[in-house]
């Protein structure tokens, strides 16, 4: 290093920033730290495990808050979260025991801050379904949140010989509760749009990929979000929803095992008590899984000012072309 470098203010500012970040990461690596804020130029997220944080309730993990300078409100219900790892399931009936029904939310989960833009959640094999998992959240300029989920099933003989993984995003009283995706047979170049708004919770909730031929025989007639199947199919691996002047675009690395789900009331009552908050959800189905094998889902959430559907398709193409 040149001696003159030591006298440059920028050098000392950069060094100070590095030391502060290292101290923060060391602090957050200690036992008992459950969340942190990560950010880029036009997006700031609070990422955390299943512990409570102020108004945010326990038993909800993932993205506690999603903030943009382009919108004064937060799109996720403050008490809950977005990209929340909510259920594991197989063919058996949904349990009445909430600790089993919501096993990923109930089981202990470790938080780790990786950098100023990246955080990670880790969970040891869960008690009933035996799923070990890691979820990494990474921000990219200007308003992109990438999620990578990896899991390893540790228990044999799940009912129906498949593993289901379910995520929920609870949306804060949007004017339009719908999600939008491309109909089966259409493409990004020649889109045919579907506006999907279920009539009630657990009714025709799940939309499958047009190439998904997996047939699951559930051991119950009681409807759930994952076993109540819509006759609709989607083509391209994304959906979007509107919030105020913004758009939330959920884009997935192509995989026919990914399913979309919707509930008009999954996010509970609105603050004003004059309606209900929807849940914009998705699933990952692993048929004929093998104990000890690793399975992976990759996705991107785009949170930006709304322009039009052409802009949505541009964001989808940009992500898929970069894979």
Image: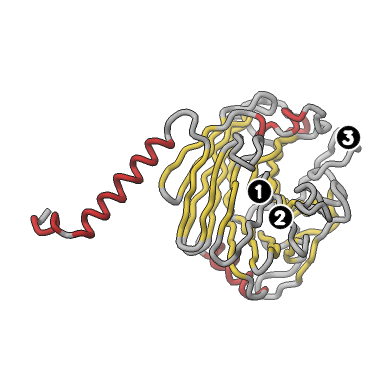
- Residue drawn at x 78%, y 27% as measured from the top left: 97
The circle on residue 220 is: 3
Of callouts 2 and 3, the N-terminal one: 2
Of callouts 1 and 3, the N-terminal one: 1
Q: Is residue 260 above or below residue 93?
A: below
Cα separation between marks 1 and 2:
8 Å
- In the rendered image, which residue does mark 2 sit on? 172
Cα separation between marks 2 and 3:
32 Å
- Residue drawn at x 38%, y 41% as measured from the top left: 24
Looking at the rendered structure, the secondary structure element under dot 2 is: loop
Please say if the residues under marks 1 and 2 sit with CB atoms less than 8 Å apart: yes
Instruction: Name the one closer to the observer, 162 or 178.
Output: 178
Mark 1 or mark 3: which is in front? 1
- In the rendered image, which residue does mark 1 sit on? 78
Of callouts 1 and 2, the N-terminal one: 1
The x and y percentages for residue 256 are: 69, 52
Q: Residues within 10 Å of mark 2 (few under 14, many from 20)?
A: many
Instruction: Name the one closer to the observer, 248 or 211.
Output: 248
The circle on residue 225 is: none
């Amino acid at each position: 290093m040149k001696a003159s470098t030591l006298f440059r203010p920028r050098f000392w500012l950069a060094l100070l920033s590095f030391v502060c970040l290292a101290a923060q990461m060391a602090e957050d690596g200690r036992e008992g730290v459950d969340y942190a804020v990560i950010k880029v130029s036009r997006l700031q997220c609070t990422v955390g495990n299943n512990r409570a944080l102020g108004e945010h309730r326990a038993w909800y993990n993932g993205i506690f808050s999603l903030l943009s300078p382009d919108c004064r409100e937060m799109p996720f219900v403050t008490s809950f979260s977005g990209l929340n790892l909510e259920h594991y399931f197989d063919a058996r009936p949904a349990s009445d025991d909430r600790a089993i029904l919501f096993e990923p939310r109930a089981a202990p989960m470790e938080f780790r801050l990786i950098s100023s833009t990246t955080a990670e959640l880790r969970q040891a094999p869960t008690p009933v379904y035996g799923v070990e998992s890691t979820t990494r959240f990474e921000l990219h300029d200007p308003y992109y949140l990438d999620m990578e989920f990896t899991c390893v099933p540790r228990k044999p003989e799940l009912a129906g010989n498949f593993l289901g993984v379910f995520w929920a995003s609870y949306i804060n009283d949007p004017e339009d509760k719908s999600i939008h995706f491309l109909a089966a047979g259409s493409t990004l170049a020649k889109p045919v749009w579907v506006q999907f708004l279920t009539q009630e919770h657990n009714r025709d909730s799940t939309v499958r990929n047009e190439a998904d031929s997996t047939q699951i025989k559930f051991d119950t007639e009681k409807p759930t979000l994952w076993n109540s199947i819509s006759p609709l199919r989607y083509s391209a691996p994304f959906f979007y929803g509107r919030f105020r002047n913004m758009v939330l675009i959920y884009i997935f690395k192509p995989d026919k095992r990914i399913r979309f789900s919707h509930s008009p009331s999954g996010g509970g009552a609105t603050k004003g008590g004059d309606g209900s908050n929807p849940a914009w959800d998705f699933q990952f189905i692993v048929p004929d899984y093998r104990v000890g094998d690793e399975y992976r889902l990759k996705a991107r959430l785009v949170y930006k000012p709304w322009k039009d559907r052409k802009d949505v398709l541009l964001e989808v193409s940009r992500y898929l072309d970069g894979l």
